[in-house]
Amino acid sequence: MCCFLFCIWGFSACKGGNSRHRNKQSDTSKVVLSEVNPTDVSTEVDTALLSLKKSGAVALEGVLSQVWKFDITDQSPCKLAFWDSATNAGGHPELGLYPDHSVTINTPCGFRIGKWQLNKDTRELLLHWDLPGTRLQQDDGLRQTKYIIREIALKHLELGWNAERGPVNVRLSAEALVHKRFVEDPFYPANNLWRVRPSNPETNEQIRMRVKNCVHFYSLFFLDNHQRQEEEIAFTRLPSCFIWYNGGIGIQPRPKLDKSWMDCFYSVDQAMTGYGLIETELEKHQLKWPEHPTSWIKQTGEVLEQLAGKL
């Protein structure tokens, strides 16, 4: 299993291809915010989302405050760093920066939450990680990560890290689409606390709230994918007890229940208690599915919110 120490050094060692918004001056550390035509939008944006392209001039912190995906190629050291040997799976780690300065990082190794801070004079982006808390803690002792913003545009971010052998670059990309209510982003930290294993046994009410928040997260997750006009959904890195169908929701059989989902609870017994809450509601067959759905992704998100309301 990979650990956070390995991943965080992987972040620092990333090198990518040529930027679409290269600084033409010799001082490559200069912050560059490219100008984008506000009418340059190929498709209509869902009303729940805000297009930064249409927002005209956007402050630096406003551009930073979105979900960034690490650019990883087959030749990139990051590909190995972000590979989860336990599941033999990789993927593109994501860094979610939010307007209230909270931060979530989601990788094949797990996830972590904390706060971010920007020093506009020095261009330092400092990520403070909460300890203890998540799968990525692993007693690694790393409480913060510091980057230097080299270049930034609406859909491109290049960060520098001062390694012992010299500076290296980290490249990230974004969609320039953010939630009008950022707390409705599925990866906003408060929507992921159900994934943090408690340090002590929980009461039945606490277990119920953990399960309710899990279902609410998946509702936001499906709706977010619909709003971004995604046709396929990647569930990599997400602990789940569900089976997803085109027009239906099931639950995994107990013997085959995802271990990563059970690890979100204090013990296997408490995970089974939470499982039973969902199982009971699904067996009642009281969830109302849209009669004429326009998208199975959207209808799944809406039905999950019904389920969360019943828990």
Image: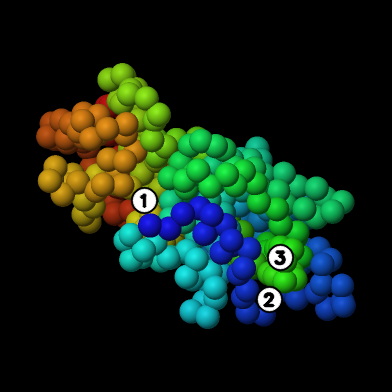
- Which circle's residue, 1 or 3, is located before the other in the chain? 3
- Which circle's residue, 1 or 2, is located before the other in the chain? 2
Q: What is the C-alpha distance between the residues marked 1 and 3?
A: 32 Å
Residue holding disc 3 = 163
Q: Quadrant of residue 301?
A: top left
Q: Amino acid at mark 3?
A: Ala
Residue holding disc 1 = 238
Residue holding disc 2 = 19
Q: Amino acid at mark 1?
A: Leu
- Residue 268 is at least partly visible in this image: yes
Q: Residue 211: where, in percent of width, then height? A: 31, 32
Instruction: Describe the element under mark 1 as helix, strand or loop.
Output: loop
Residue located at (47% from left, 64% from top):
82
Q: Quadrant of residue 305?
A: top left
Q: Amino acid at mark 2?
A: Ser
Q: Residue 104: where, in percent of width, then height? A: 54, 46
- Residue 223 is at least partly visible in this image: no
Mark 2 closeness class: few <14, some 14–19, many ≥20 residues within 10 Å: few
